[in-house]
Amino acid sequence: MTSPGELERTLRAELRGEVDFGAAARALTTMDASNYRRVPAGVVAPRDAGDVAAALRICADAGVPVVPRGGGTSIAGQATGVGVVLDLTRHMNAVVSVDPAARTAVVQPGLVLDRLRDAVRPYGLLFGPDPSTHARCTLGGMIGNNACGAHSVAWGTTADNVTELAVTAYGGSSYRLGTGWAGAPEGLRELVAGNLAVLRTGLADGFSRRISGYGGLDALLPERGVGVARAFCGSEGTLGVVTEAVVRLVEAPRAPVLAVLGYADESAAADAAAGLLGAGPLTVEGMARDLVPGAAAAGLPRGDAWLFVETRDEAAARSLVRGADAVDSLLVTDPAGQRALWRIREDAAGTATRTPDGGMAWPGWEDCAVPPARLGAYLREFRALLAAHGLRGTPYGHFGEGCVHVRIDFDLVSPAGIARFRSFSGELADLVVSHGGSLSGEHGDGQARAELLPRMYGPEVIALFGAYKDVWDPAGGMNPGMLVRPARLDENLRFAVLPPGGGDLSDGVARCVGVAKCRTTEVGGPGVMCPSYRVTGEERHSTRGRARLLHEMLAGEVVTDGWRSREVAEALDLCLSCKGCRSDCPVGVDMAAYKAEFLHHHWSGRIRPPAHYLLGGLPRLLRTVALLRAATPLNAAARLLPPPGLTRDRPLPPLAHTPFTRWWRSRTEASSASPAFEARVRAEPGFGKGRGGESRPQGPEATAVTLWPDTFTEYLSPHTGQAAVRVLEAAGLEVTVPRGNVCCGLTYVSTGRLDRARTVLRRTLTHLEGAPDRPGDAPDRPGDAPDRPVVVLEPSCAAALRTDLPALLPDDPRAHRLAAAVRTFAEALEQYAPHWRPPRLDRPVVGQTHCHQHAVLGDDADRRLRERAGLTGELSGGCCGLAGNFGFEPGHHAVSVACAREQLLPSLDAAAAARPAILADGFSCRTQIAQLSPYRAHHLAELLADGLREKGPAHTP
């Protein structure tokens, strides 16, 4: 066999696309969304079909296997492989043409499904199959797995919607497949002619979800039209590489209606599903209460399980509801309402990865299917089988076609757990077969189920599968170990290479199951993840890609230099630490925390980059500047020459001349010394006013809140703190501010200086225990009582106190008390001044929800406060791109600006004519807006304080 070095040189010489046999490229493709891991020799990103043919010829000459790869979202292991991985997403990702009259499109294999949808939507058309991964799965992957999705009841599988395929086989031969024998490989017609009886008795049973094995071979029967292209679908990359496809489009329903039907339990819903098919629905999806968050369930009809049934129009929906034996029902015609409900169903794919107690559930038996009439009985026996093995999983899925998704809490690490995984798999296969079902109903068998195919098919069919593979791939170079002559289902498990007791990082990266929600490029909505991937489009800059690199770093096989890894450092360099993955990732991967830990180890014992000292040590640096009263000369110096180690592409924000706590001390000291001053302060509009403007008690009878002087408010934006004081006091709250040096440790965490962060946080906790807030005050213990919340104006600092603090000091009870006491500005007003009415601003609002607020804190209280103040409209999702220190570090400016230009800046321009209020609670967000646009953004406290000044408190009519 040719050496990897020689193979790489040959491929580079003959291909126009990228060839990468480096550690990072290999590490990024060791896994897909399954439980399996295989290490490739290298990765090739072909430019076109000519490159694909050349790569397959060169690899065949060298005796090196090939596996084609799309979005890498396969859940059975078929997108992993040894040898060469063909990444078809980088260049071969176009919609070649659309023919609206013929209702067809020509597509390349690396095209993401949603991009095809976007292209044909103007013609009123769509591609029928719609897996829940539609924002990142590719057409080539859908063809390889014969993917289906929610609408297969109406529009069938991918095989039902493919008319022609251009395919290149191992060795470089090319074929054009359609209907009939023209273009088929030599020997295929003879194979079919010699096995007609096997095809008719072993495969042609009419079950639409029989995806397992080469289950579409019956399409080659003469009475079925010799559908060679159709038969190729579902071959999981084991026969050849699709380089182009002609797909059939369908007319999009003009006004679909969603009926949600409630049932007493899951089995009742499953029993009812088959009876609804006669009404011609577009979808019949099922799920039970244990996959629905409590708040979401409140919007569903009564019941403990539901069927989501879509119809073409309202009349059909009403007729279906009348005929359904449901406990309760809900009919939704509004598209926005439908999207909200469908999101509940689509989110089940993420919810199912967690057990009720927070444990992980894994793929492997994700999509078995049985005839719909058998579904209720099958689910009852399936639940019993889980219980018998001491396993847990929550089924949901395409009940109208009997296809069930489930993730199960297998122990895939210990020998006993793996043995149980194997024995359960065999018994479940037997159960599925006993109900006339298919081991795979839409995602393929891969390595997870191929070993068990003889339980589903007789020996003659299995022999036919082998012969079919050999017609296409006699050398066995295409994706070996899948479908035919498969690997064992308990081999190549991805957890086996991780070190035992690897700690939080090991557990975290293992949690990434590879569903690739982080690879979406869809614009709009509240989501954040993953801003750097959305800009670069490179796998290594996705949350999944970074998790894969960390996984391989811990494994030590591909990435061999551990914490000093250059590959991991480069991938994490463009991570903005936005924490969007913490909430948007279905399994809660927290790449910001993993980055901090990596940087902590990576730079241990070494001189760090200057930015780590300048920006990471920002609280200490700015405190020194304030003590020296040197803000004016430092601002002048920064304008002339930026500090070394920071980007020269953006100016530093100016330091305030008077820090917030200095203003606070002068205010409180003057108040204590001068009755006239106190009277003047109390005469300010809205001071001490509650609902309707009535006076509220101050002093000992008022609820006391501690206003946290975060670094940004303290030294860069003290007017924000001053505005917050005005509003909180207007709401009748007594404000105290810690004296001295307190810090949340955020900048130290974000630069990976975790030991320093712990020291700073311990000092802060000790200071809070012993330092008075105001002259004459008792020591402040912020977490001791619910009437002393800590109000944090900067969302990133609030998130650090709420999550990073207890994680860094898990054994310090003071850390947990402080974390529990943290409130955002809006939360404090809502919880501790519930009867106060803010001034009515009555104007539209645009701006940015801070990434950490979205991911950690939540913004429900902010939304309610904005509504009460008459601020209408939605804030932008995504990320502003400045992200604290990120936007000031060398090499980050282009990515930082691109993030802002994706959603934030366009939303400001689009709303400019309405002269909206521009809201951004994060200092980074406000800075980015000021530096990249003509607009100025404000903290919510500033808007409300201005309203108090202009209008005074609101009054009850």
Image (tube, grey):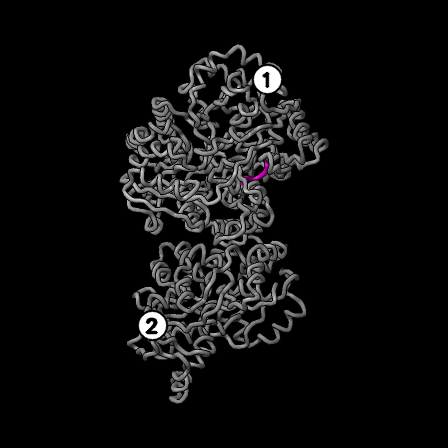
Q: Is residue 216 above or below residue 932?
A: above
Q: Position of residue 583 (x, y in %)?
A: 44, 51
Placement of the N terminus among the 4 image quadrants: top right
Task: Give the dominant element type of the magenta stretch: helix, strand or loop.
Answer: loop
* Residues at discs 1 and 2 in contact (Cβ within 8 Å): no
Q: Position of residue 936 (x, y in %)?
A: 56, 69
Residue 836 sits in quarter:
bottom left
Image side of residue 56 versus residue 527, left or right: right
Q: Position of residue 243 (x, y in %)?
A: 62, 31
Residue bearing the label numbered 1: 474
Distance from Cα at disc 1 to Cα at disc 2:
79 Å
Q: Is residue 109 above or below residue 170?
A: below
SS class, disc 1: loop
Which of the numbered marks, if any, corresponds to residue 704? 2
| Residue 669 visible at all | yes
Q: Is residue 498 above or below residue 296?
A: above
Which range is magenta?
Answer: 109-113
Q: Residue furthest top?
A: 194
The residue sitting at 51% across, 46% down in the picture is 518
Q: Amino acid at mark 2?
A: Ala
Question: Could you tell which of marks 1 and 2 lies nearer the N-terminus?
Answer: 1
Q: Is residue 112 magenta?
A: yes
Q: Is residue 80 above or below residue 318?
A: above
Q: Decide which of 170, 202 is in the foreground and name it.
A: 202
Q: Residue furthest right?
A: 13
Q: Between tags 1 and 2, which lies in front?
A: 1
Task: Count the numbered circles shown.
Answer: 2
